[in-house]
Image: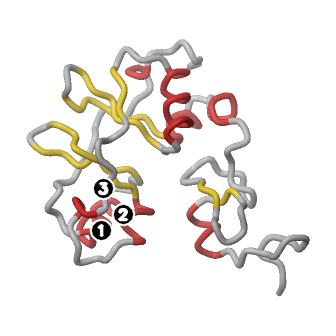
Amino acid sequence: MATGLTPVREIMSKAVLGVEPGMRVADALDFAREHAITHLPVVVAGRAVGVVCTCDLEDAKLDSDVSSIMHAPPVSIGSECLMAEAAATMAEKGVGSVLVLTGGRLTGIVTRSDFERVGMAEAAFGDQRCSVCKSYQHVHIDPRCGYLLCAACRAGARCAKEGSELGGGD
């Protein structure tokens, strides 16, 4: 079982699929859905220049380029980094993934899903869970109501006014 002292290289996803900065958002979204991935490194000649997640893609104009919405520079760590350090970096930067670099080259990615897979999500992210479904995935504070919501619940939520139930009403 992985611990905070486990190097990220032992649990990272090594088969990293990325997109190019000039790719259309619609094509990148189709690509992400086709491969069932939520975080896409934006890569030029094997070097990560940014990152986008499906949340970014879904909220963007479909005919725009990925470069116009990517987060750059990407949050990254070295392959010798420990899981505890990766979790701290993700929490500090408010991101759901970190790119793993070896000698400046993209060699992997670590996401909150990886922490869940190895049983470390609760220890790593504590109460940073969706207020509705308790997921650790794509959790952000919804500005409409101030609750931590995952992308799926945020899409379906009718944020409640203070004192009433989240998504209340029939």
**62 relative to 142 in the view: left or right:** left
Q: Which type of secondary structure does the marked residue at label 1 adopt?
A: helix
**Comparing marks 2 and 3, which lies closer to the viewer?**
3
**Residue receiving disc 1:** 30
Question: At which x and y percent is residue 147?
Answer: 72, 60
Q: Relative to 106, is 29 above or below?
A: below
**Marks 3 and 1: CB-CB under 8 Å?**
no
**68 relative to 163 in the view: left or right:** left
- Labels 3 and 1: the sequence-earlier one: 1
**84 relative to 69 in the view: left or right:** right
Q: Relative to 129, is 91 above or below?
A: above
Separation of disc 2 and disc 1 at Cα?
5 Å
Q: Residue at x 40, y 30 (%)?
A: 12
Mark 2 nearby-residue class (10 Å; few <14, some 14–19, many ≥20): few
Badge 3 amino acid: Met
**14 relative to 148 in the view: left or right:** left
**Residue receiving disc 2:** 33
* Residue 74 image-quadrant placement: top left
**Residue receiving disc 3:** 70
Badge 2 amino acid: Arg
Badge 1 amino acid: Asp
* Residue 28 image-quadrant placement: bottom left
Separation of disc 2 and disc 3 at Cα?
17 Å
* Residue situated in front as seen by the camera: 43 or 13: 43
Q: Which type of secondary structure does the marked residue at label 3 adopt?
A: loop
**Marks 2 and 1: CB-CB under 8 Å?**
yes
Placement of the N terminus among the 4 image quadrants: top right
Q: Residue at x 47, y 17 (%)?
A: 82
Question: At which x and y percent is residue 113?
Answer: 52, 42
